[in-house]
Image (cartoon, rainbow, N blue to C red):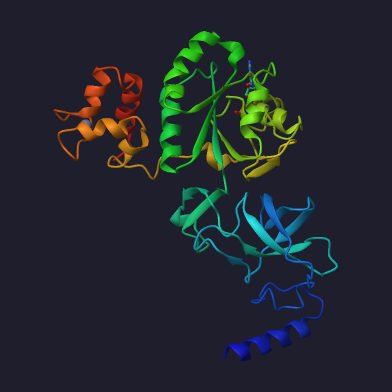
Amino acid sequence: MRRLNFVVFEEFFTNVNGRVSGICQWPNDCRFFMKRDDEGVPCGVVMEISGASYLVISDDGREYRCRTFPGTKTENGDSTLVAVGDRVELKMIETGTALYEAAITLVQPRHSALTRKRDVRRNRSKEKVQVIAANIDQLVVVVSAFDPPLSTRLIDRYLVFAESEEMEIVIVVNKMDLEDSRETRQLMKPYKALGYRVVYTSAEEKRGMGPLRKTLAGKLSAFSGHSGVGKSTLINQLSGQEDRLRTGETNMKTGKGLHTTTNSVMLALPKGGYIIDTPGIREFNLSGITRDNLRFYFREFLSAMQECSYSSCSHTVEPGCGIMKAVESGHIDPDRFESYLAIYESID
Ligand code: GDP
Ligand code: ZN
């Protein structure tokens, strides 16, 4: 049966004579579609997605405009077939049209993925998990010291998200030129004590860019943070392309509203490493966090909760709570505990 199908397809491809068809099921056998590649399979990283078109930079530094087809294989199950950050294998397309230069034959396994729950009503594809970005090494959370003011509640939400995703996190405090530096550093002290990396910058005055570059070197970093904190300004400076992303200011001038692009974009850093700026990451939520698992994402709670009288202690009202005792004795920062209670209240 399988053999028969193959013969039918072979005939089909002979007959369509020169037109690219999307129904090829055998990327490796289909001579119509691909050039034979005797020098090994070219691999690359997906830099940008627009509609059904993928911009891939191959390992030897060439840019290819690529497409998938029904025979594209994946090692990532039912999730989004191709996401920014994916490593893919390519076959050159021999069509004579300049529209696409290569086909993605295989999406390699992801070592990490930033995902979003699928909206079932709008889900036309089979994917169960929507991947916003793949193979991220670290999440870079950008906050501002002022305008908007520094919110430890917000930082704690990001940390809960990163811990639940088992992701490395870097906290970038931008707009240091607008606020008293000593006060800001004091507010960030508990995070440093917990082992989180904190980098202070002023994108406007180009300060702190050296340490930030060092933190990003050789890694794939996803930038996240509320609108207006200075992500675009920072990314533009890091990438060395001043106009790469529109900043709030530019948008105000054009009147087009903030960040009109909705697709993920990956930028190569001049000295190695990549940044992904994804609207989807900016709007992440704590959809995977429940009242039962929240406690595990405050890293300083892990040892203190061993002392709770009840094994199912929620650390909100129970007597003999190890975490509340640790807050009273000063071993756990009361502000972090307040964040725990606030997030606990906000979820069910
Ligand atoms: P995004 O929404 O996070 O991408 O923020 P933008 O990069 O668009 O910046 C929002 C506004 O803050 C713009 O008017 C920037 O010029 C300004 N801005 C960005 N970084 C700094 C900074 O370090 N200091 C000051 N004072 N303003 C900044
Ligand atoms: Zn407890």
Which quadrant is the C terminus positioned in? top left
**In which quadrant of the rendered view does residue 191 lie?**
top left
Q: Position of residue 289 (x, y in %)?
A: 36, 42
Q: Nearer the viewer, residue 250 or 182?
A: 182
Residue 186 percent location from the top left of the image: 46, 13
Taking the spot 54% from the left edge, 37% from the top edge, the residue there is 139
- Of 15 and 212, nearer the camera is 212
Give the residue at x 52% y 49%: 113
Picture quadrant of residue 93: bottom right
Q: Quadrant of residue 157?
A: top left
Q: Which residue is drawn at 46% across and 38% down?
A: 162
Question: Residue 198 appears at what percent x and percent y?
Answer: 53, 24
Residue 248 spot, x, y in % from top left: 65, 26
Q: In which quarter of the image is the N terminus?
A: bottom right
Quick check: 89 left or right of 36?
left
Q: Does residue 334 sit above or below 165 in this rendering?
A: above
Label count reads 0
Q: Is residue 82 above or below residue 11?
A: above
Residue drawn at (84%, 65%), measured in percent from left and top?
97
Report whether 256 appears left or right of 152: right
Left of 240 or right of it: where is 345?
A: left
Q: Which of 231 and 87 is in front in this view?
A: 87
Q: In this view, does 28 lie above or below 194?
A: below
Ligand 2: which quarter? top left
